[in-house]
Image (cartoon, helix red, strand yellow):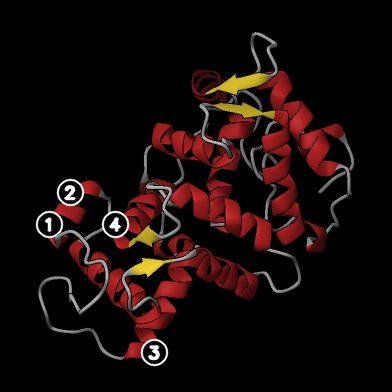
Amino acid sequence: MQTDEKAVDGGLLPDANGKDPNQGGQTDGSKWQKPRLSRKSLMKCCLVKWIIASTTQQGPDSCDSDLELSMVRHQPEGLEQLQAQTQFTRKELQSLYRGFKNECPSGLVDEETFKTIYSQFFPQGDATTYAHFLFNAFDMDRNGSIRFEDFVIGLSVLLRGSVTEKLRWAFNLYDINKDGYITKEEMLAIMTSIYDMMGRYTLPSVRDDSPFEHVEKFFQKMDRNRDGVVTIDEFIETCQKDENIMASMQLFENVI
């Protein structure tokens, strides 16, 4: 990431390749367009890679037409219901569930599993804190475990959701204590965890003060009434009007 101000201005996430989110993107005055999600970009998702790897190890796809249900502590909703709740196809849901069940026979994912996944994909950094925050964002029931339904609904929003849906999910990630507001401290905690996981090993390298600068720029734009916190309305409205921020939203797939 560059040392000039532009490198920390606007973007919600640092690029996993250390590039300015606006670099090589749209020119001044151009309108941001939602990127089309290809199979290649889908496979950049760490959680999808984890699931697909498990499915591959398990062998050829089962010929069963519905979700395979074993003797697990939690059995997911029916396939048709999940299709209606997500942007995944029937075949994709079947594949995701086979991998999920193979890795998590109980039907539930715990936080330690998330930490293991991200330590595998970001071995040079410390992914522990980021995995903790990400797990909490997926854990809708706040009970310390993630059901298959929560898992695929979250993935669907992040990978194929509308702009507003992605922004709401991002707000939930940054709102660590889930009180409906984002503070500077919360944003700094998330940003620091991302830099700890992969930012320090990008080329060009990231400066130690980059997370703080990033948060300062974020709040200058978001905190409209200068009360020290950002509401979900401020967050969504500002993001939708700022092309730099919107362009950086597609970088979620690099750290999810």
> Could you give the CA–CA distance between mark 3 and mark 1, rounded to whole angstroms?
26 Å
- Between circles 3 and 4, the one closer to the viewer is 4
| Label 2: element kind | helix
- The number of numbered discs placed on residues in the rendered structure image is 4
Taking the image as shown, residue 227 lies to the left or right of residue 88, namely right
- Three-letter residue code for mark 1: Glu
Picture coordinates of residue 23 (x, y %)?
71, 43
Number of the label disc, if any, that sits on residue 84: 2
- Three-letter residue code for mark 4: Glu
> Could you give the CA–CA distance between mark 2 and mark 4, rounded to whole angstroms?
12 Å
Q: Counting residues from the N terminus, which is met first, the one under dot 1 or under dot 4? A: 1
> On the image, numbered disc 4 is attached to which residue?
149
**In contact (CB < 8 Å): disc 2 and disc 1:** yes
- Three-letter residue code for mark 3: Gln
Number of the label disc, if any, that sits on residue 57: 3
Q: Counting residues from the N terminus, which is met first, the one under dot 3 or under dot 1? A: 3
Number of the label disc, if any, that sits on residue 80: 1
**In contact (CB < 8 Å): disc 1 and disc 4:** no
Taking the image as shown, residue 99 lies to the left or right of residue 173, namely left
- Three-letter residue code for mark 2: Ala
